[in-house]
Image (cartoon, helix red, strand yellow):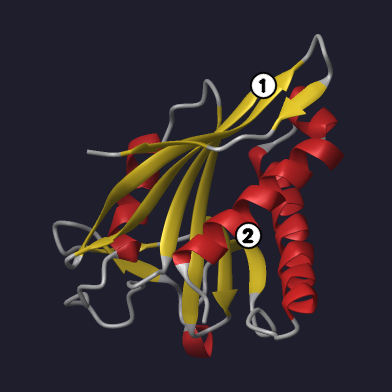
């Protein structure tokens, strides 16, 4: 069974660590967010397959890490319902999903210093992790977990979103990578802070 802890601790965090180990120059040189998401998706798929092999069962067999994915079952455009119950077109930066069935993880990424759309990204993550069925047909809801990832040359911060009694909200913040340019080392600790 796939749960939030597996998605965050065994897939997302190791994928971000690998991104910094393998693709650090892309981050350092300010390569586009789309490239960073694509590289993260690449590492996620590899880590999902490694997880299955290590544990001897295949919980991620039908799962993919997709960038800028905008379709639901039968090829319909992907929508979510906002807090005002308005149906909104949706393209997530990155999803781990069983295509056409369910989203396990929705990720929105922003480089440090970029503020356009941050509030909407966080609201959308809260909306799509909610277990409350939307009033509109064919809208995304019930995503297992959401993550707003803020990254820079020196650190990665994750704000996690999950459902609480039918309402999506921030559940915790964590800093997982501190990069020391002088020592050329990654400090790979998780520092968790519950959201109140």
The residue carrying mark 1 is: 154
The residue carrying mark 2 is: 10
Quadrant in the picture for residue 45: bottom right
> Where does the C terminus fall, quadrant-wise?
top left
Task: Name the element at disc 2.
Answer: helix
Q: Is residue 119 visible?
A: yes
Disc 1 from disc 2: Cα separation: 22 Å
Does 181 sit above or below residue 32? above
Task: Name the element at disc 1.
Answer: loop
Q: Measuring 17% from the left and 57% from the top, which residue is drawn there?
A: 83
Does 34 sit above or below residue 184? below
Q: Measuring 56% from the left and 74% from the top, which residue is drawn there?
A: 97
Does 70 sit above or below residue 18? below
Mark 1, residues whose alpha carbon is within 10 Å: few (<14), some, or many (≥20)? some
- In the displayed image of the protein, which residue is found farthest to the top? 182
In x, y percent, where is residue 89? Answer: 38, 63
Q: Measuring 65% from the left and 84% from the top, which residue is drawn there?
A: 62
């Amino acid at each position: 069974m796939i749960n939030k802890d597996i998605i965050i601790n065994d897939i997302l965090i190791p994928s971000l660590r690998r991104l910094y180990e393998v693709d650090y120059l892309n981050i350092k040189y300010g390569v586009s967010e789309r490239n960073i998401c694509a590289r993260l998706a690449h590492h996620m798929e590899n880590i999902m397959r490694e997880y299955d092999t290590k544990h001897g069962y295949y919980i991620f067999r039908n799962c993919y890490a997709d960038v800028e994915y905008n379709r639901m079952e039968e090829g319909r455009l992907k929508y979510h319902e906002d807090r005002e119950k308005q149906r909104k077109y949706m393209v997530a930066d990155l999803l781990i999903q069983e295509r056409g069935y369910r989203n396990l993880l929705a990720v929105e990424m922003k480089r440090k210093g970029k503020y356009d759309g941050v509030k909407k990204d966080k609201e959308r993550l809260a909306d799509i992790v909610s277990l409350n069925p939307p009033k509109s047909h064919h809208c995304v809801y019930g995503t297992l977990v959401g993550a707003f990832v803020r990254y820079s040359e020196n650190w990665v911060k994750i704000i996690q979103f999950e459902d609480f009694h039918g309402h999506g909200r921030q559940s915790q913040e964590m800093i997982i990578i501190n990069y020391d340019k002088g020592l050329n080392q990654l400090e790979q600790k998780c520092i968790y802070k519950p959201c109140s």
